[in-house]
Image (cartoon, coloured by chain):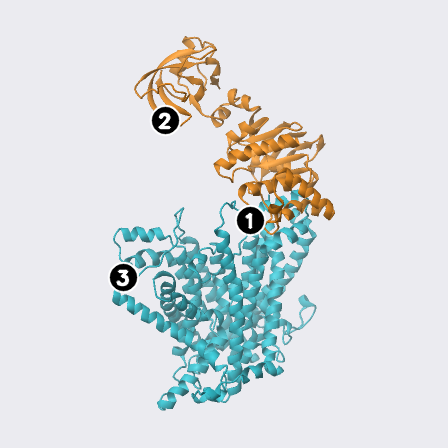
Chain colours: A orange, B cyan
Amino acid sequence: MIRFENIEVTFGEQVAIPQLNLQVEQGEFFTLLGPSGCGKTTALRTLAGFIEPSAGEIYIDGKAASKLPSEKRSVGMVFQNYALFPSMSVRENIAFGLKVRKTGKVETDRLVDEIAAQVELTPEQLAKNVSELSGGQQQRVAIARALVLKPRILLLDEPLSNLDAKLRVQLREQLKNLQRELGITTVYVTHDQEEALTMSDRIAVFNHGVVEQVGTPEEIYNRSATEFVATFVGATNRLSGEFLQHLRGSGGEFLAAEKSSYLRLEKVGLQPPARGASIRLDGVIADRVYQGSHSTYTIDSNGSRLRALVPENGALPLAPGAKAQLYIDPSSILQY
Amino acid sequence: MRNSSWRAMLRSPLVVVVLVVLVWFVATFLVLPNATLLISTFFPDGKISFRALEKLVSSERALNSLWHSFALAATLAVTVNVVGIFIVLVTDYFKIRGSRVLWLGYATTLIYGGIVLAAGYNFIYGKYGFITNAVRNVFPDIDPNWFSGYFAVVVVMTLATTTNHMLFLGSSLAKIDYQTIEAARNMGASTWRILWRIVLPALRPMIFAVTVLTFLTGLGALTAPLVLGGTDFQTIAPMILTFSKSSGSRDLAALLAIILGLATIVLLAMMNRVEKSGTYFSVAKVATPLQKQPIRNPVANVLVHVVAYMLFVIYALPVLLIVLFSFLEANAISTGTITWDAFTLANYATVFGTPAVLKPFVVSVVYSALASLIVVLGMLFVARVFQKHRNPMTSLLEYLLHIPWILPTILIALALVMTFDRPNPLIGGQVLTGTTMLLLVAYVIIKIPFTLRLLKAAFASVPESLEDAARILGAGPLFTLRTVLVPLVLPTAAAITALNFNSLLDDYDAAVFLYHPLYEPLGLAIRASTEGENNLDAMSITFVYTVLLMIIMGFTMWLVYGRGGASRRRRRSRPGRPRGGAGAAAVPVPMPVPVPVAAAAVTVAAVPAAVPAAAPGSQP
């Protein structure tokens, strides 16, 4: 559906994206994830046609598109701040693109009403001024405005970053459901790994303009391809050489001794696992932070200070200073 | 992404047209006249000559006027600061009873200034003034010329130029983080120590900027010395006017204008430097709005109240008297005896019933309206092009468009007269001097910098993503400009138009050099009424003019600030609005409304930008 082929973007002397190759499939929810300044927004804006790449080609539906102006690419976009036109009503905002296309009045009204119903905007809200809407409602207007032109691709540039935490989680689901219903190919930019993991079909992790890994959320999290992905997505423990040596001596011979090694927090068990292989190590509890549904323990073991995410399921908590047994599956260790 | 390359800029036919017109305008009306002025002064016959300088050195009058101007400027720098800081503190900082009323009294200079104010004071305190006559009825020995010369000019200009303090210092004060004051009090600092060590230091950059403006106003003062200076106290600007009237001394006029211009440039450059190096912004993430401070010492409290109300009377009295006198028979004013029978509507009937009397008013309204519309319309395009395409060419043009800011109005006017008194190929071989066009051109020129800066700020405050959004929805550049951008900058554009209109309405400085004898603007008519002895009817008519002007200006001010402030407050109080999203394009007009809270909403960027802009309009 969308193919970035050797795309290079430069701003003056500065190279924002050296060489980008990506493929997004039809109907996919595809996320560009990375820290700020990593080039993810630049990639999206290049796809939208706001930035002309200095080299390479973008193919949309098999056709070269990098010379096409934005409006000819059949992409709809929702901006970070929504970019609603403050001088127009909600209805006028949604109808803007139709007006540009000189769609008839009756047809315009029909299309606006249809899309408004889809994103759950009431007729009263359509008559309001955009500044009278809440953040979540404004976001729906922005989505409706982008979708009313029936684009083949929907671009979303951090559309949830303006909202408070609770609303963010709620809208995350709504957005995902809407995308699933419409089946529209969606490219989503975010720096929030949780958003990326929960919403995406596939994720591309960006760093310094380079894609470090493309994969499903599980692949990105459990089989992080690079050290950057492992540390950027989710929390990790970095394992010391001594700790690794110990693992190698008790069943983890396949681990490389000289590589940087990481272990996810929830992969450090304080109870023997129900199934699967595990290595038992001794440790001492250094600290415990209670977080409601779970606790994070800090444990000293074999020269490493590990954090472990333990569900609070009724077991007696361990106090600092207490001895603890750690159960670790060596195959869950990420090495680079 | 903004594309600043030349190619992209020249691809749009609209941009090309705007640039071509702009280059022609800048070359013809900004660069050429001022170059002509310089050349005709120092290279009158094609080779360098210092004859003008010799003339200046040998002319006692001219040298005296120079000295007087600098003396006036220096005096004003002190007196205006003393009065100005005092009125800002009593209206915005200290807890003073009736501070809203006081504010209204001090703010009277917002709605009348320049020639109108000078004439007003002259009619009240001058040789034939009401107060002078009234006092002389009781004490016949008093010198009728008591309100004249250096003293009178300093008094009038001090009162007139505190406007800058009210506008700019007031808004700086509102931006002080109140928590710093609370912290100081918590550590045991007294009212005076807090004022001296916390508040005034925070205001220092703005005080400096306002002082420079005051100094410049004093240096270029035209109307106050003209009307009230008498024969003994003439300053540069009136001298330039006198010398420019005969061709033999025009070079001297030009030289004086150049000296004035140089002084202005040096001072503005100084101000710019200081502004860049030492503006204090609140470091607080959650600044608390200023709360008014009570004066704890009872003696000091009473004293401050007394002085504040005395000043109120001094400010408000002329306005009240002018309104009163506009309803009085001229005789009653001149004899200083007012009875009930003397009240009449005849003066208004004369103004509205006599075409010849109403004409100057109409002429000024037409000129001001045309000039303010033309300049806003033109700058709307220019600002858009400048904001969208940044390259050496647009930067240069932008600098050149600021010429009217660094040159006094008198110099610009004189340069226009001297340049277009012969056929000029740049304007199709026409002569403009002596036509109705030249004054219009001057008015447009004078208003360019203020208009351009504010419009540019307005365009800049529109989030870039709005344009992108319009583009991705298929809108072309012109459609986007028309449907998305212009509606957003329209409130600002309307406000600028209104302010420009206001300040041109009673203009004297440019008009006196450039007016067409058959279309005399208001400023000149008012000035004429202050000349001579038995000009009673003219005086009454001037009172009516003044009342009309005050109504128009007051109404405009209310339209621009009063209502704007109210809607801004409403908008600010609405929760859940996304950053930079809807409503981000608030009117960035650089003046506070009479409410301290709203004054804080004045955008930081707009205030320094507008500081020099206020100066030309308020030169009395």
Q: Helix or strand or loop: what does disc 1 sit on?
A: helix
Residue B204 in percent (x, y) is at 37, 58
For residue A3, what is the image quadrant? top right
Q: Is residue A187 above or below residue B117?
A: above
Q: Observer-nearest residue: A177 or A223?
A: A177
Q: Are marks 1 and 3 on the same chain?
A: no
For residue B87, what is the image quadrant? bottom left
What number of labels is visible?
Answer: 3
Residue drawn 31% across the image and 18% down it: A322
- How busy is the neighbourhood of tag 1: few (under 14 within 10 Å), some, or many (20 plus)? many
Q: Observer-nearest residue: B349 or A49?
A: B349
Residue drawn 54% across the image and 50% down it: B584
Q: Which residue is mark 1?
A: A131
Residue drawn 65% across the image and 27% down it: A25
Residue B23 in percent (x, y) is at 63, 59
Disc on res. A289: 2
- How busy is the neighbourhood of tag 3: few (under 14 within 10 Å), some, or many (20 plus)? few
Q: Helix or strand or loop: what does disc 2 sit on?
A: strand
Q: Which residue is mark 3?
A: B296
For residue A158, what is the image quadrant? top right
* Residue B570 appearing in the image: yes
Looking at the picture, which amino acid does disc 3 mark? Arg
